[in-house]
Amino acid sequence: MHEARHRTIRRNPRSLHIVRRVTPPSGGHVVYQIHEARPEIVAAAHAHSIFGKAWSAVGRLVGPITQDACAFYEDHVFFDETRVLVTDANEGAALAAALGRCKAAILRNHGLITVGETIEEAVWWFVSLERCCQSQFLAESVSTPLQVDPENARAARAVNGTPFVGWLQCQPLWRRIVRDSPISLAELHERSPRYRARPP
Ligand SMILES: [Zn+2]
């Protein structure tokens, strides 16, 4: 995020606000088909973060073992694709189909991807899912974690897993990023009011 600049942020291609295609070759196909399938999605977050990519090799979804993890209960998928590079439109379409209406996917042997109706929402789900992967590793390292039952997991997701809550949870992080990156995201805010933090 500290490297993000106005010219390097790519918006939903359906909105015709693509500024510049600068992501790595495989990155374009990862997100483009998702935008095609989900017009309400403004942003997708994808990175090879340490706990996310480690959990992607485990081959399971994140379980509802904490309140935070319940935000992803029945709302994320495991994309069981053995080719780790998403290099063409067909593979991107397969990922978009697997993602369905969910907010996140764990890409086998690859990492995490999250989506949101705002940039902030997509960022927050990514940060939160990465932490959920970390928490599950910690819990499973000492015992079999207790699971929240389905009814309570769904109830927690209904409260903690909405687009607004994702946006809201990101605000302290967003402020810190802007404060610590005066020439990057601050510049972005100045040049494009569309990117200003605001409720969805
Ligand atoms: Zn990747």
Image (cartoon, grey):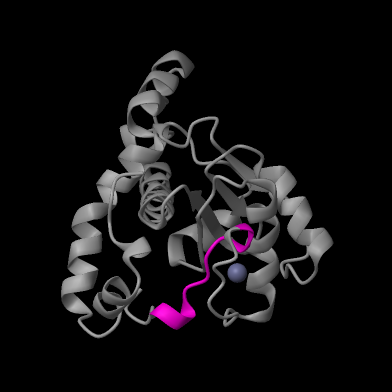
Viewer-closest of 20 and 166: 20
Residue 79 picture location, percent across and down: 68, 49
Taking the image as shown, residue 182 lies to the left or right of residue 90, namely left
Q: Taking the image as four quarters, which one is ligand 1 found in?
A: bottom right
Is residue 23 positioned above or below 95 on the image?
Answer: below
Image quadrant of residue 22? bottom right
Q: Is residue 148 visible?
A: no
* Quadrant containing the C terminus in the rendered view: top left
Residue 63 picture location, percent across and down: 48, 35
Any magenta on residue 40? no
Q: Which residues are magenta?
A: 6-14
Viewer-closest of 67 and 177: 177
Viewer-closest of 127 and 6: 6
Is residue 152 positioned above or below 180 on the image?
Answer: above
* Quadrant containing the N terminus in the rendered view: bottom left
Image quadrant of residue 12? bottom right
Residue 53 picture location, percent across and down: 53, 62
Residue 106 picture location, percent across and down: 59, 51
Kindly identify the residue that appears in the image at 51 percent across and 69 percent down: 48
Any magenta on residue 12? yes
Taking the image as shown, residue 191 lies to the left or right of residue 8, namely left
